[in-house]
């Protein structure tokens, strides 16, 4: 496979597992998921390495509600279920995907123009797969931001007519050289966008993100 094409295919790592995590979370938190019904997220085949942004080649895309290795999902569930035991288990293995949500406080959701402006303020870039990304000096993606509607992408035209009830932030600590520093930036970016866009940050279980969860995740990296 062409190296550049491989890099694009690797985007599926984050997005496909995010889709699986969202489906799992939906089943366990049905009462909290009414606003998220019908959402699917962009995904491609296998988890793996970091990818380079703005590749001009395209990757095959598929939607599948049953993706993601079961053992990975269970490990992630075990991590997020362990918040009450942080004092007893200060060092926990990091989940394969660190995934949080930013939910709009306004009933109409986040508007596309407001999103573009806010993403510009925090330095996120619009990538080749139509999601926003944090890029390092080598144009490798540290973490991504997807929409909560449709396949998770943001339109590249008529953005003023676009609305989404929320955003999904995801990063893969296992493929990053300095996961802890990137996680710090990930959290800071989330918090700044929550202020700028007037949103609420939720953890994997759709609960408000706590300092305890942040601390546990940081210690695991």
Image (spheres, rainbow, N blue to C red):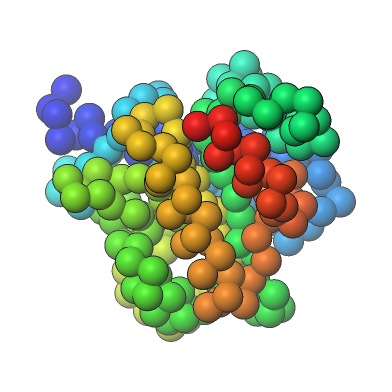
Q: Residue at x 51, y 69 (%)?
A: 192
Is 81 drawn above or below residue 33 in the view shown?
above
Q: Residue at x 74, y 56 (%)?
A: 208
Picture quadrant of residue 74: top right
Q: Residue at x 72, y 40 (%)?
A: 25
Q: Residue furthest right?
A: 31
The residue closer to the viewer here, 107 or 194, is 194
Quadrant of the rendering where the N terminus is positioned: top left
Horizontal side of 34 relative to 101 (left or right) equals right
Res 150 visible? no
Query: Could you say where residue 185 lies in the image, as x and y percent from the top left?
Result: 43, 54
Res 29 visible? yes
Query: Could you say where residue 73 lies in the image, as x and y percent from the top left?
Result: 63, 26
Query: Could you say where residue 125 lies in the image, as x and y percent from the top left?
Result: 30, 62
Is 116 drawn above or below residue 177 in the view shown?
below
Picture quadrant of residue 166: bottom right
Q: Residue furthest top?
A: 71
Q: Residue at x 39, y 79 (%)?
A: 117
Query: Could you say where residue 115 lies in the image, as x and y percent from the top left?
Result: 45, 74
Horizontal side of 159 relative to 109 (left or right) equals left
**Circle count:** 0
The residue closer to the viewer here, 205 or 21, is 205
């Amino acid at each position: 496979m062409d190296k550049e094409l491989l890099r694009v295919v690797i985007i599926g790592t984050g997005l496909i597992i995010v889709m699986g995590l969202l489906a799992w979370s939906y089943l366990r938190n049905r009462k909290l998921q009414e606003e998220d019904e019908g959402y699917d997220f962009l995904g491609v085949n296998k988890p793996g390495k970091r990818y380079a942004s703005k590749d001009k080649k395209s990757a095959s895309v598929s939607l599948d509600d049953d993706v993601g290795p079961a053992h990975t999902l269970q490990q992630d569930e075990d991590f997020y279920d362990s918040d009450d035991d942080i004092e007893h288990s200060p060092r926990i293995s990091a989940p394969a995907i660190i995934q949080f949500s930013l939910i709009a406080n306004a009933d109409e959701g986040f508007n596309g123009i407001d999103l573009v402006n806010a993403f510009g303020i925090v330095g996120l870039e619009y990538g080749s797969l139509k999601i926003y990304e944090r890029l390092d000096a080598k144009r490798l993606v540290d973490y991504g931001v997807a929409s909560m509607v449709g396949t998770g992408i943001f339109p590249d035209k008529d953005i003023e007519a676009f609305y989404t009830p929320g955003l999904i932030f995801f990063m893969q600590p296992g493929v990053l050289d300095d996961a802890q520093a990137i996680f710090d930036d990930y959290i800071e970016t989330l918090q700044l966008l929550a202020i700028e866009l007037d949103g609420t940050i939720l953890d994997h279980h759709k609960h408000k993100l706590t300092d305890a969860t942040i601390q546990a995740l940081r210690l695991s990296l």
